[in-house]
Image (cartoon, helix red, strand yellow):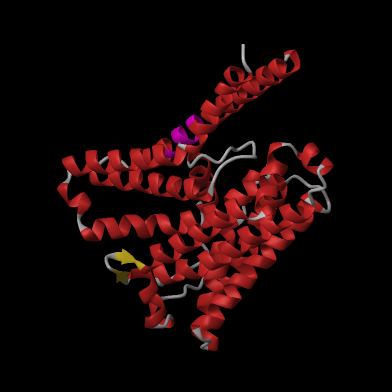
Amino acid sequence: MSTDTAARPVRRFESLLRARELGIAIVIVLVVAITAVRNSNFLDAQSVQQLLSGAALIALLSVGETMVIITRNVDLSVGSTVGLSAYVFGDLFKYQHISVVAGFAVGIVLGAVVGAVNGLVTTVLRVPSLVVTLAMLYVIRGVDGMIVNGHTIDPTAIPHAFTEVGYRTLFGVPWLAIIVIVVVAVAGYAMRSFRASRDLYAIGSNPEAAALAGIPAGRRVFTAFVISGTLAGLAGALFLALHAQVDNSGGIGYELAVVAAVVVGGVAIFGGSGTVVGAALGALLLNTINQALVASKVSSFWNMAVAGGLLLAAIAFDRWLSLRVARGLKSARGVHRDV
């Protein structure tokens, strides 16, 4: 038995991992086509724009979440950060009359601070990220509730030029979707091209080996959390642009939707593999299914059931795939020793 023959299973499953994004794209096309047959209005320009805008914020949050999950961590505070950032942004518009640029800066810095706290507690105090970010979720919700105090930021307090970001289009594509596409493209390029980004995969694949290789795991994980928080702060500002109003319920449930999109998009919940493009496609797939159920007049109660089913299927598939790849690698190493 040759070395090439022994390594063939490994290459086959690695190719399957790389093709995950294509598979998700095909499923999206199939869902759209089947729904369009049942409801021709599903492919109207306005419906497509709503589909893209609806998936945009989850796709944006999935970029930072991907970086965190690849390192075998998780960030459950993104939804609460979105809500806090959106309300603070709107409050500054309403009472301080600040510029749009300054408002964006405040939202982004606020998110970065939350991410930095998550990263410090996780890496320095060695507290599991699940515990840290879950606690931060409740802390931020409490702070948000005290700041909001029953009030609502309504559209009259938001500059019209800013709310245009939420509904204006360029060649039929919503500006919001264009912003997210640019972020996903930049992050995708960085994850493929820079050593610091590749270190995230090494940390998630084998933390012990990464430490022996001299990779600064703490610094890399901290950076991943800061990026996740920063993008959540940006998402909060865009949330306000999309909905033109916000109260203390803003962003509730986003954290679970983001984790579902990331895992469905091919990012291994056990760390070490996945792409931001796949995660963004996962967000688009989940939103497409939700919209398809609405267009097909299926009860909205099925939305969460479908998302949960896809999440379980994706986790089970990733686990099966990782075991097969590990078995293939073990077989290949055995052949090398025999040779």
Q: Is residue 176 above or below residue 59?
A: below
Looking at the rendered structure, the number of numbered marks drawn on it comes to 0
At 76% from the left edge and 39% from the top edge, which residue is drawn? 207
At 65% from the left edge and 53% from the top edge, which residue is drawn? 197
The reply, left or right, for residue 323 in relation to residue 258 is right
The reply, left or right, for residue 46 in relation to residue 9 is left
Q: Is residue 100 above or below residue 288?
A: below
At 39% from the left edge and 62% from the top edge, which residue is drawn? 177
Which image quadrant: the N terminus? top right
Residue 286: image x %, image y %? 40, 44
At 72% from the left edge and 62% from the top edge, which residue is drawn? 116
* Residue sitting nearer the eye, 334 or 121: 334
* Residue sitting nearer the eye, 323 or 225: 323
Q: Is residue 97 above or below residue 305?
A: below
Q: Is residue 97 visible?
A: yes
Q: Is residue 250 visible?
A: no
Q: Quadrant of residue 168?
A: bottom left
- Magenta segment includes 312: yes
* Residue sitting nearer the eye, 51 or 320: 320
Which image quadrant: the C terminus? top right
Residue 124: image x %, image y %? 83, 54
- Magenta segment includes 54: no
Q: What residue range appears in magenta?
A: 307-315
Residue 308: image x %, image y %? 47, 36
Residue 3: image x %, image y %? 63, 19
Q: Is residue 89 above or below residue 333?
A: below
Judged by its main secondary structure, the magenta piece is: helix
